[in-house]
Image (spheres, grey):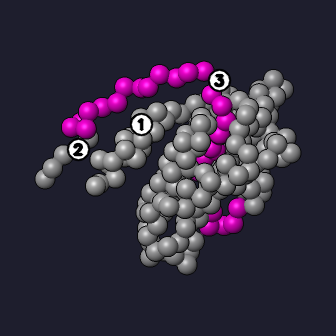
Amino acid sequence: MNILQSDAGGDFQALVAARRNFTLRRLHAPGPDAQALERMVEAAAHAPDHGLLRPWRFVLIPQARRADLGEVFAEALAERDPGCGEEALATARDKAQRAPCLLVAVLRDDTAAKAIPVAEKLVSLGCALQNLLLAAGAAGFATGLASGAAMDAPGMRRLLRLEAHERAICFIGVGTAGIEKPPRPRPDAADYLSSI
C-alpha cells in the first residue's frame, strides 16, 4: 500500500494541513527539551541532498546568549539608521528574547562543491526546514520563521561563527502557540499544477 494511502499517510496529510507559521513573539514556553530538539534536527537530515553535501546547518541560540543576539540586532539597526532612538534599540534587543527555542538556519555554499548549483543547495535547506517544522508539529510544538536585515550583519556573522562560504538565512522559533491560528486559504492544486 502506498504511504499516502495508508493510515500513516492520512496522519501525514493532517500534520501538513495543521502546520501554521507563528510570529516569534507568539511562541511561549514550554519549548522542546534537548531530546525533542534532537529529534526535530534529525528529521531535517532526511532532506534531499544532491551530492550528499549537507549544504546547511542549524545554530542554537541558547537563553544564556540571547542578550548577545539582542546586541547584534541593536548594532545592525544603528548601522542602518544612525538616528534611531533608545526606544527603537530596546525593541531591537527585545526581539532576541522571543520564542523559548531559537535556531538559525545557515546555508553552506562551499566553494569545493560548486558543481552543485546554489539553487539546489537552497532547495535542500528548504526541505530540511520543512522536515524540522513538521517534526516539531508532530511533537506538539508551534513554529515560526523570521528573517530581516540583521541576517547579513557583520555582528551576526561573528556571533554565529559563520565561515566565508556560509550565510544565515532565517530564524526558526519553536515553542507553544499563545493563540489558536485558523488555516489560511489554500489554492486549488489546479492553480499551481499544470501539464505540458
- Judge by depth and name the residue closer to the eye, 146 or 75: 146
Count of residue discs? 3
Q: Which mark is residue 14?
A: 1
Residue segment shown in magenta: 162-191
Question: Could you tell me the amino acid type at mark 3?
Answer: Gly
> Residue 94 appears in which quarter of the rendering?
top right
Between circles 3 and 1, the one closer to the viewer is 1
Q: Is residue 154 left or right of residue 4?
A: right
**Marks 3/2: CA–CA distance:** 35 Å
Between circles 3 and 2, the one closer to the viewer is 3
**Could you tell me if residue 192 is visible in this image?**
yes
- Residue 31: x and y in percent read 71, 38
- Judge by depth and name the residue closer to the eye, 66 or 77: 66
**Could you tell me if residue 149 is visible in this image?**
no
- Judge by depth and name the residue closer to the eye, 127 or 88: 127
Q: Earlier in the sequence, mark 3 or mark 2?
A: 3
Residue 167 is a magenta residue: yes
Q: Residue at x 70, y 52 (%)?
A: 35
Circle 2 — which element? loop
Question: Could you tell me the amino acid type at mark 1?
Answer: Ala
- Residue 17: x and y in percent read 41, 35
**Residue ID for mark 2:** 193
**Residue ID for mark 3:** 178
Mark 1 Cα shell of 10 Å, populated few (<14), some (14-19), many (≥20): few
Q: Residue at x 73, y 45 (%)?
A: 33
> Residue 12 appears in which quarter of the rendering?
top left
Residue 169 is a magenta residue: yes
Q: Are marks 1 and 2 in contact (CB under 8 Å)?
A: no
- Judge by depth and name the residue closer to the eye, 8 or 171: 8
Q: Earlier in the sequence, mark 1 or mark 2?
A: 1
